[in-house]
Image: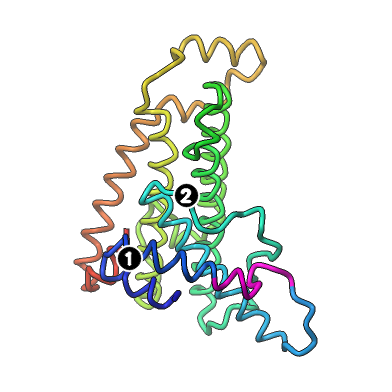
Amino acid sequence: MHSQALTTEILLDKEATYIALGAAVRVATSLGLQQQLKDPRLSPPEISERYIIFWCMYSLDKSLSLRLGRPPAIDDRDIEIDIPDERQLAVTNPRTAVLLLAHMKLSRIASEVYSELYSARSRRYPALKRFRTISELDTKLQEWCRSLPGDVQPGKPIVCTKENVRHAITLHLEYFNCLATLHRCWAFQDQLTEYDELHNEMARQGCGDIGDRVYTGHMICLDSARNIARLLIAIDQYGFPKRTMLVG
């Protein structure tokens, strides 16, 4: 089912992907892929493979959730396992492992963006709480970005080998979509609280310097759109088939 979801994703059929991925998640949950295992019959490579399958499914689930604006199939509260490390990934190229792990970590942040800002529960949050949440998640995204090697950091020219360019472009597309989705929540909503009033309230609480980037959210969204456009041009320049790249 996971393979079918990936196939329909490449075919740009989001509705079919959403249905197939939901079925795959239910199968994975019934198999306990999200749980810690102590089964002596499974070797360490087999256990690692289970974890990798789950986190790849998790990444697609959270990406699709943000792009469709729908609840994800996987609830983070049900996950017992950690993201695998580089030694557990069955790839020969160390940089490929770095990009795969970065994608999984970005998916954790994307999950928070949806649950804390777009879920039904989050809509009842007061403006100040939403503002703080956007600022905190923006900080997480910037820290994630700085943790990447310089040659694959979003916003900078991609100078890695052609073998990893495809992974890097996909990662950058996911990052800028996540960043724009995060700031769009505040920048283009009907403001229930005026900026000055909110800023004064934060100053009274001793945190007036928090969230400076949130005030310029509309510019961040615009810059993200421009970066996505540049990445789409890069896909043509590298000669990659668009259908296998435009998964968003």
Figure quadrant of residue 21: bottom left
For badge 2, the amino acid type reads: Pro
What residue sits right under mark 2 in the picture?
71
Q: How is the image coloured?
A: rainbow
Which range of residues does the magenta coloring cover? 27-36
What residue sits right under mark 1 in the picture?
16
The quadrant of the rendering that contains the C terminus is: bottom left
Residue 102: assigned label: none
Residue ID at (54%, 77%) = 94
How far from the left and from the top, in percent, is residue 195? 45, 15
Which structural element holds mark 1? Answer: helix
Depicted 162 relative to depicted 60: above or below: below
How far from the left and from the top, in percent, is residue 84? 64, 70
Residue ID at (66%, 72%) = 32
Q: Is residue 27 left or right of residue 223?
A: right
The quadrant of the rendering that contains the N terminus is: bottom left
Which structural element holds mark 2? Answer: loop
Depicted 246 relative to depicted 213: above or below: below
